[in-house]
Image (cartoon, rainbow, N blue to C red):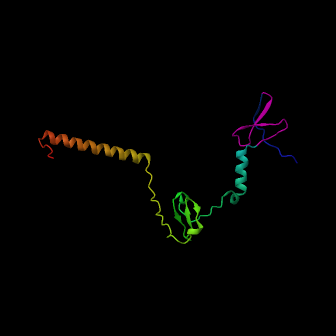
Amino acid sequence: MKKKYKQQPEYNEKGVRYMMCQKGCCYISVGDKATAVRCSREVNYTIAQMFPEENKPARVKTGRPAGWHWMAEFVDKDGTVYHRGKEQPDLKGTLPVTVVKPKKKTKRRSQEQILLAREKEKKAALRKEFKKQKEFLNHKLLEK
C-alpha cells in the first residue's frame, strides 16, 4: 500500500523542480516523480529522537585539570611526569604530584546590574566633587 502524503508547495525554476520539505522549513530540489521530501535537519532530528543514548558522546574524565598539557611540567596522581603534554617515563615517581588550585568561579552580572554599578560610581564621583567645592566656598582649604 502506497503512503499518501499531504501535497507540499512546489515550483519550477530553470527546469529544476523544487518542493517544500514536510516540516515546511525549506525548499529542496527533487526529481519528477517525487511526492514528498524531508530536509536533512528533519532527518537528523528524527534519528536523534530514535536513538538518544547513541548520540551522547561518552566523555571519560581523567581527573587532570584543564590545560594540563600546556603546563611546562605536570605530575599526575600516579607519578607520571609530563613536559608540555609529553610523557617522560624516565622521571616517573621522582617528583611530587602537581597541586592545582580550582578556578574561582566569578558570578556574572546582568546588564542591569552593570548599569546600576556604573551609575553608582558616577554619583559617588559627583558627591566627592561637590564636597570639594563646598569646602572651598566655606574657606576650608585642604591642607597637604
**Residue 47 located within the stretch drawn in magenta:** no
- Relative to 78, 15 lies left or right: right
At horizontal 51% and vertical 62% (from top left) the residue drawn is 73
Q: Is residue 60 left or right of residue 100?
A: right
11 versus 25 height, above or below: above
In the rendered image, which quarter is residue 50 located in?
A: bottom right
Residue at horizontal 26%, vertical 41%?
126
Q: Residue furthest front?
A: 90
Q: Residue 66: in sight, yes or no?
A: no
Q: Position of residue 123 (x, y in %)?
A: 29, 43
* Residue 112 seen by the camera: yes
Nearer to me, 80 or 25: 80
Which residues are the magenta region? 14-37
Residue 127 lies in quadrant = top left
Task: Indicate the position of residue 33 as horizontal and vertical percent values.
Answer: 85, 37
Q: Please name whichever residue, 97 or 49, is drawn nearer the observer in this view of the structure.
A: 97
Furthest toward the top, the residue is 14
Most prominent secondary structure in the magenta stretch?
Answer: loop
Identify the residue at the far right of this view: 1
- Say left or right for 30 vs 135: right
- What's the residue at 65%, 61% (across, down)? 58
Can you say whether 95 is above or below 105 in the image? below
Mark count: 0
Specify whether residue 34 is painted magenta: yes
- Quarter residue 141 falls in: top left
Residue under the image location 46 percent in, 60 percent down = 103
* Horizontal and vertical percent position of residue 11: 76, 31
